[in-house]
Amino acid sequence: MSQASTPVPTRPTPSPLKPTETLPPWNVLLHNDEVNEMGFVVESLCRFARLSVPAATRCTMEAHKKGLSLVLATHREHAELVAEQLTSLRLTVTIERV
């Protein structure tokens, strides 16, 4: 006795996503200050900007020596969030559109 085979339903293949316009980048800038200790600044950058310890150290030293350092470039909402978090720790941080 042979059984008739029934077709197995298959999932439709998803169509490739269309490229969307990328969001314009914003820079998060750390300013030098004479109030905070470097270790605190490095730790804060690691925690909120998600930098590695060496990257946070380089950023902190650049701000200390040159007065300003680029922490990260990202979309506006994320830049505002990181700047707000760092500012709440009394670090001097600004954002600017690239």
Image (cartoon, rainbow, N blue to C red):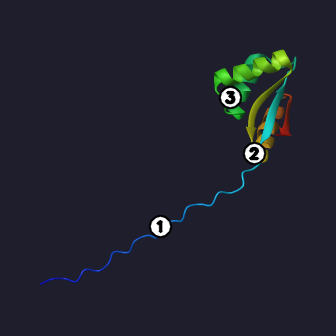
Q: Where 95 sits versus 35, above or below?
A: below
- Quote the CA–CA distance across marks 3 and 2: 19 Å
Q: Label 1, on which residue?
A: 13
Identify which residue is drawn at 65% across, 23% down.
Answer: 53
Residue 21 vs residue 94: left or right? left
- Quote the CA–CA distance across marks 1 and 2: 31 Å
Identify which residue is drawn at 71% across, 34% down.
Answer: 48
Q: Secondary structure at mark 3?
A: helix
Identify which residue is drawn at 80% across, 35% down.
Answer: 28
Q: Secondary structure at mark 2?
A: loop
Q: Label 3, on which residue?
A: 46
Sooner in the amino-acid sequence: mark 3 or mark 2: 3
Rate crowding at label 3 as few (under 14), some (14 to 19) or many (20 or more) other CA atoms within 10 Å. some
Position of residue 13 measured from the top left corner of the image (x, y, whole percent):
47, 67
Sooner in the amino-acid sequence: mark 1 or mark 3: 1
Which three-letter amino acid code belongs to the residue tagged 2?
Answer: His
Residue 52 vs residue 95: left or right? left
Sooner in the amino-acid sequence: mark 1 or mark 2: 1
Compare residues 9 and 49 and report the one nearer the observer: 9
- Quote the CA–CA distance across marks 1 and 3: 41 Å
Which numbered mark, 1 or 2, is in the foreground of this view? 1
Which numbered mark, 3 or 2, is in the foreground of this view? 2
